[in-house]
Amino acid sequence: MALITHDDFAELLTRIRQRGLTHMLARLRLTHAGRTRSTFNQAELQTSNWWNIPAVRKRWNKMITGSETLEFEDYVVEKYLAGSKNLTLLSPGCGSGGHERRFARHPQVFDHITGIDLSPNLIREATALTKKEGLENVSFLVADIHSMDIPPACMDVILFNQALHHFRNVRNLLENQIWPALKPGGLLIVHEYVGPARLQWEADELAIINRLLREEIPDKFRMRAGSRTVKQRVTGPGLLRMLLSDPSEAVDSPHILLALEELFEKKEGRPVGGNILMPLLKDIAHHFAGPNAQAQTILQHLFREEDEFLKTHPSLIHFGVYQKLD
């Protein structure tokens, strides 16, 4: 694992332009937990995230539910929870609460949904959006699951959406906090990054990514968001940046799948990819979010390249439904 890479310098320049030098220097004085909280406390920061591309989200839906228009929350309710009533759901690391609100739109199924997150800004945003939508069966609070006193067997469903890979010692968390909190027969739903720790991409993966960046994406679609620089290549992050930016990022991700399958019964698991698209589209995704015909044609080609890669490599992102047995 390299200490510093080319991507680290490009990332630093981009983030300074987006957030300002004062903010970036202030992060150096924070503790590990403080850096993690700061990373996710930017509710209004405009970044170019690949998961905000509508075509990417349709792709995820198709890979998980079989339909581009069916979100996984509605799929889970239809397939596993139809006819259920008065259920409770807990979502650690809920962010701004989009997935929790979608579950809450099934009031005939869920009596109450609780989302928790370390970020006060994101919790405020989640609460405001919930109030605006008029949902009464979901609430959000600033909390750390490690310090919560959760009664045993009190939850019907627990959700981890891109949050589980931020926990150290995933096996310990699942075994000693999540498993006891679920009722017998309760469901654990995960939509998670399960790839290499600290986002250390494989050499053959980087070779494909850089070929596509160089040969398939014109310069006008490689301008980084909030910057005047062109994305020239991808090397992956160095260890120093990972620790300074967010020490929790992918800290124990390689152990997630094994821990899940050892502790719970797997009802289903779906590969969601991300191997090529995530590093390739980082900071340039905004070019592909609109209806531009050329951009959408390129994007479909990138999808095919990732599909080909996934034939011989494990997916970086995994969707799964697991059940607690007696």
Image (cartoon, rainbow, N blue to C red):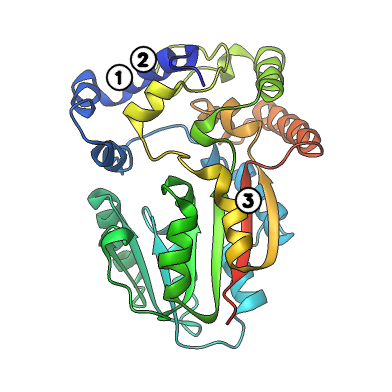
User: Which is more toward the observer, 243 or 206?
Assistant: 243
Q: What quarter of the picture does the C terminus occupy?
A: bottom right
Q: Whole-Å distance between the Cαs marked 3 and 2?
A: 31 Å
15 left or right, relative to 186: left
Give the structural element (helix, strand or loop) at label 3. Answer: strand
Identify the disc placed on residue 103.
Answer: none
* Visible residue check, residue 191: yes
Q: Position of residue 78 (x, y in %)?
A: 64, 76
Q: Is residue 45 above or below residue 114?
A: above
Residue type at mark 2? Leu
Residue 323's quadrant in the figure?
bottom right
Q: Where is residue 53 in the image (x, y as percent from the top left)?
A: 56, 40
First in sequence: mark 1 vs mark 3? 1
Q: Residues within 10 Å of mark 1 (few under 14, many from 20)?
A: some
Identify the disc placed on residue 318.
Answer: 3
Residue type at mark 3? His
Q: Position of residue 210 (x, y in %)?
A: 65, 16
User: Which is more toward the observer, 164 or 234?
Assistant: 164
**Number of the front mark, 1 or 3:** 3
User: Which is more toward the observer, 131 or 40?
Assistant: 40
Q: Mark 2 points at which residue?
A: 13
Q: Name the residue under label 1.
A: 16
Which residue corresponds to the image point at 66% horizontal and 47% vertical from the top-left? 272
Which residue corresponds to the image point at 61% horizontal and 45% vertical from the top-left? 317
Residue type at mark 1? Ile
